[in-house]
Amino acid sequence: MRLIDREEVAQRLTFQRCIPVVREAMIALSSGQTQQLLRSIIPLANGRLFGIMPGAMGDRATFGAKLVSVFPENAASGAQSHQGVVVLFDPVTGAPVCIAHAGEITAIRTAAASAVATQSLARPDARRLAILGYGEQAVAHARAISLVRKLDCISVWGRSTERAQAFATQMENELTIPVMAFTSARACVIDADIICTVTAAKEPILEGKWVRPGAHVNIVGSSYDGPVEVDNDLVTRARFIADSREGVLNQGAEFLRAKRAGLISDDHVVAEIGDILSGRVEGRQSSDGLTAYKSLGHIVQDLASAWLLYASPETTPLRDI
């Protein structure tokens, strides 16, 4: 049994490697090559969760599951909010062959998925990124998005001005572009071409009326039917793309809130991101249109990322993203 710990995941699962792998995984999902069940979520005390996500990459490919706890309060102390394991099974023998650190895989593959969506849906000339949130996913998204668009600047907002400023300083030093912390979400996003919401907010922190024409929004923070990050106006006006149609129709909180208000139907989910990537469905239709990608996170992303680490030597050449 191979154990891949957090340090090895962080070292070897670079965004240059993960972004192409996630892209292929989402194409496989949307073309029916993979099998998966909706995630099962067990509520724990104090808003904590335990999730089980099983899936198979194909008849002759790896299968397995992610077991993960979600403890949102961990972020305040710098610990990971998502902790657990990804278990891989060998497709030939059926034996469990690998246990990988789920928290680090989740952090990287989630931002990689947003980068894939941004690459497909944001305007080619998008240069200004706004991030609502300043935790682990905010850092990961700044790094990943900067690989698929040549950013001129990044803006950030969060409820703690001190932590938002600390994030701005860290990322400005790392990415060598201007990063500015804002004291209001509206001011943070008003001029943005790309917006990522990566918070634990229970009620909307992004309103559609603040978003400029032509922007692209990655809605990432809520992974089950409950907390919402964006308002109904944004959902209804956007060309709405899902990572998994079945997942969003059952567990996409922002979509379901607008649907329950009678504002949209299931047809409002235009496509899965894999349909866009494969060319089956058009992504952005105009330079001033609003696009939104709802990310719930998907087991095929975890399995593909973990299998890359398990099956590929460190010397495997990087592929273009």
Image (cartoon, rainbow, N blue to C red):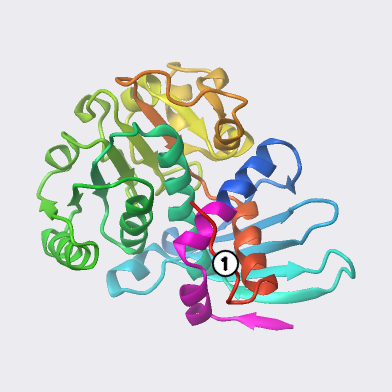
Quadrant housing residue 56: bottom right
104 relative position to 65: left or right:
left
In the image, what residue occupies the spot 51% across and 74% down? 12
SS category of the residue bearing label 1: loop
Q: Quadrant of residue 79?
A: bottom left
Vertically, is 42 above or below 122?
below
Q: Nearer the viewer, residue 66 or 300?
A: 300
Disc 1: CA contacts within 10 A as few (<14), some (14-19) or many (>=20): few
Q: Which residue is mark 1?
A: 317
Please, what is the three-letter code of the amino acid marked with disc 1?
A: Pro
Q: Position of residue 129 (x, y in %)?
A: 25, 44
Main SS of the magenta part reads helix
Can residue 321 be seen here? Answer: yes
Q: Is residue 277 magenta?
A: no
Question: For the N terminus, which image quadrant?
Answer: bottom right
The foreground one among 223 and 30 is 30
Q: Which residues are magenta?
A: 1-21
Q: Give x and y (percent) for residue 317.
A: 57, 67
**Magenta-span inclusion, residue 5:** yes
Whether residue 49 is visible, yes or no, is no
